[in-house]
Amino acid sequence: MRRLALIAILAIAAIIAVTIATNASGAGGGVGEDPYQIRAIFDDASFAVQGEQVRVAGAPVGSIVGLGVTASKQAAVTLEIDDSRFAPFHANATCAIRPQSLIGEMYVDCNPGTASTPTLQRITKGPGAGSYYLPVTQTSSPVDFDIVQDIYQEPVAQRLAIILDELGTGLAARGSDLNAVIHRADPALGNTDQVLKILAGQNHALAKLATDSAAVLGPLAQQRKALADFIVQANTTATASAARAADISRSIQLLPGFLRQLRPLMADLGTLADQGTPLASDLKTSASALGREFTELTPFANVARISLTQLGAAAAQSQGPLVGTIPLAKQLNALGTQAAPAATTLDRLTASLSKTGAIGQLMALLFYGTSATNGFDSLGHYVRDELLVSDCTGYATTPVAGCSANFTKGTASDAADSGGGGKAGVESNGRGATARAANDGIASAGAPLDRLLNYLIGPG
């Protein structure tokens, strides 16, 4: 029992010790206190009232809990930070009173500073004791828009003159104070001074920049149309790329895998390049000859261009006739298809005639037959012939009875018997004489030969 009581006493003592240590650390740094208050000094509180918000980067972190006036006639605004995540404020912290709405509501916009700088100093005595001090050099309160608009009431010129007169009277011999107030009222002016100092220290670099810019902008000015077209095309490209943003994102995601697969190919290309180095050297040696060849090829290309143009024109003109030959081509195709069996048979016939020598024998027959019908004496060659004189040998424009150039169906004797009368007898005697003259080697040819002779020399 005593042991349990001792353990309880030790536990209570440990809790008390931890509480005292926590309070002590909070008093020293200000982070553990609740709430964390800041006494910010402004040249002008600009209609700020208690209860209005304190914001950091637009997020509400506290409110205004007190307003006062310092001995130097400046506004002292007590800010209470309820969100411990934004406490403590550091030595480079800043605050500005800004309009919240068109009806004149204000809020305090603060930047807690960077953690690498010390925290704000705590006020130990006097007004604002226990809070943390933010000097006037780190605050600003811009002039409200409605105050500026008040000068536009009639008469504007007189009101503006009164403002300038009163301002000059009140600020006589206090130019440095006015300058400090203006810089605190708008921190951008102070930053502008710093920028101008930096630019003044870099005047040589700026002069060189101006010279180089002129050298660069001169050619760009000459190509301003091309540059404007580039901007337009870039806008078109960007619009098209934005429409395919998902596909482009997917392509970028697939790019690492593609590169992994590309690595062996690039190694093979490197090997190919190493092996192709001798070939490239030989090509370098023959480059001049190739250049001359291409130079000489240019006139040929120019002439060929004209020829190709003319060929295109001719093709365009012949297109209609060529299309018109399609029916003829179809008929020729049908004719060729139908003539294929006969052509095949004719090919076999001519091949057989050529193989057996029939063509040569036919030529010999014609040669020897011609030689047999012709004679030869001391004067030369002569043709054996018989002059026939009758009524059928004269030229006539109308048919003559008994004279016909057609084959007869009967024999020569039948034709003689069908004549009748004196003229027919003459024709019969003539035909009989012819038959007797040719009786040595022709009469035995039979009826077909008789009909051929009747066709060639006529009846009679």
Image (spheres, rainbow, N blue to C red):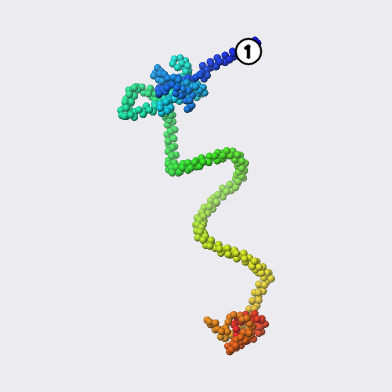
Residue that numbered label 1 is attached to: 7
Figure quadrant of residue 48 = top left
The secondary structure type at the circle numbered 1 is helix
The residue depicted at 52 percent of the width and 17 percent of the height is 26
The residue depicted at 53 percent of the width and 39 percent of the height is 245
For the residue carrying disc 1, how many other residues have a C-alpha within 10 Å: few (<14), some (14-19), or many (20+)? few
In the image shown, does 156 or 311 lie closer to the viewer? 156
In the displayed structure, does residue 137 sit left or right of residue 25?
left
In the image shown, does 135 or 162 lie closer to the viewer? 162
**Residue 173 spot, x, y in % from top left:** 34, 22
Figure quadrant of residue 424 = bottom right
Figure quadrant of residue 187 = top left
Work out which quarter of the rendered image holds the N terminus and state it: top right
**Residue 246 spot, x, y in % from top left:** 54, 39
**Residue 309 spot, x, y in % from top left:** 50, 57
**Residue 377 spot, x, y in % from top left:** 62, 83
In the displayed structure, does residue 283 sit left or right of residue 355?
left
Question: Vertically, is 13 above or below 436?
Answer: above
The residue depicted at 61 percent of the width and 42 percent of the height is 265
Q: Is residue 379 visible?
A: no
The residue depicted at 38 percent of the width and 28 percent of the height is 145
In this rendering, the count of numbered labels is: 1
In the image shown, does 110 or 208 lie closer to the viewer? 110
> What's the amino acid at mark 1?
Ile
Q: Is residue 34 visible?
A: yes
Question: Vertically, is 223 above or below 375?
Answer: above
Work out which quarter of the rendered image holds the C terminus and state it: bottom right
